[in-house]
Image (spheres, rainbow, N blue to C red):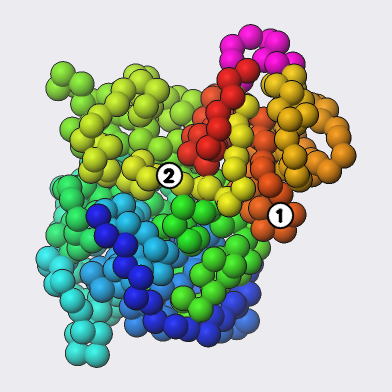
Amino acid sequence: MGISTAVTAFNTKVLPASAAQITFSSALEDGAFTASADATPWIDASRNALRGNMCVGIPTETVYGLAANALDAAAVRAIFAVKGRPSDNPLIVHVSSIRMLRALYHLPACDDVCDVASKALPFLGTDNAALEGSALHAALQAAEQTGEWPEIPSAYHEAIRKFWPGALTLIMPRPPCIPMQVLGGHGTTVAVRFPSHTVARAAIAACGLPLAAPSANASGRPSPTLAAHVKHDLDGRLPLILDSGPCDVGVESTVLDAFSPNAYVDGELVPCILRPGGVTFESLRALGGAYKRLRVYRRDFTSTEIEMNPTTPGMKYRHYSPTAPVYLFVPSAGSASCARQREKMHELLARQTGKIGVVTVGDMDISGNGHVVCVTKDAADLAHRIFALLRALDEDEHVDAIFVQGVDETNEGMAVMNRLAKAASHHIVC
């Protein structure tokens, strides 16, 4: 494991980018789109930066991402350097269409270093022989004769139809064109997502390249749900941030494995969620078939191999932590849990000195001088706002500690409790 610190200095620009400026010709299969004239500045700037192997901050429906060309090892290494991210922590590859994902399996093996000045980059994702090149276009057409999406494991087809584009990442066989740096230097699989955010999808489609993109924050900090969060953490470390306002989901994608050996029990497919996120356990289990036995990592099983050599981000290192210590009040079973959370919060608040930030859910009443209380409606609202609240309390209110009321780990609660468990330095079971 290594952390690169050498980063080119930039005058970081923030350009407004609106989903209303973009219209895609296909919801899933093809990345072709039309754009209004006022979208030209951010489309051109992002395309030039990304095809020039530079990093760009882009909005997605989950959190803002730090994106770069996933086909080039040097561009991928820049992501790790800009974030200060450990090099053995894998990245997710983002595509703008099913066609772009399929095309990856027909490209030649990657070179370790790509000289952009002398080597033409591919242009992927649209059903256009002039853009794709005649050889790749013919290869995709030939593959289609063997069935729908022949390059994609069939266990994912139903999930793709229901949840893509969206907040679902799939563990796929690694295409030879994807450098090992994307995988954190180990393994034979790669995590892939097709984001639903129109600006993200357009940025990927406009550059014609799959983009490796972790969250666009300094490593270990709360994930960014506003362009301002990206600017706060990474100003001067990347040339461009696309600002499309707040993210809709607010937590990262769900990572689903229905392909690797981890997805099999005694030779039988039993899919597993490696990281809870924007698509709930309940929604995936409702797919039926093998998904009726869907498992969740750390709840239903553990693996030393996964811990040491993770196939997806968010599994090995502490994440999402503000500077102020976070106290998570974990609910236990029973209807009295909320009352116990309130009682324990008041007990601990009475012993604290300094300014305390408190995040509550529903109708919990927390009062007291000097406290900054943030109220969320329910688990879904907490999931949507938690990263922004942690940042606001830490960076704007400068609190000395943050208390968070936990929720039951059902539906959206599973994802938010996963993130809070990693952010918190203190866990109080109520």
Q: Nearer the viewer, residue 282 or 275?
A: 275
Kindly indicate the quadrant of the structure image that contains residue 366: top right
Label pair 2/1, CB-CB below 8 angstroms? no
Q: State the extent of the magenta-drawn residues as a range.
A: 331-340
Q: Which mark is residue 240?
A: none
User: Can I make out residue 63 in this image?
Assistant: no
Kindly indicate the quadrant of the structure image that contains residue 342: top right
Residue 405: image x %, image y %? 67, 30
Question: What amino acid does circle 2 point to?
Answer: Arg
Residue 429 lies, with reference to residue 414, above or below; the image says above
Q: Residue at x 59, y 15 (%)?
A: 332
Question: What amino acid does circle 1 point to?
Answer: His
Kindly indicate the quadrant of the structure image that contains residue 31: bottom left
The answer for how far apart the CA atoms under marks 2 and 1 are is 22 Å
Q: Residue at x 12, y 65 (%)?
A: 109
Residue 57: image x %, image y %? 49, 69
User: Label 1, on which residue?
Assistant: 398
Q: Which mark is residue 318?
A: 2
Q: Residue at x 28, y 37 (%)?
A: 307
Q: Nearer the viewer, residue 72 or 423?
A: 423
Q: Is residue 337 magenta?
A: yes
Q: Residues within 10 Å of mark 2 (few under 14, many from 20)?
A: some
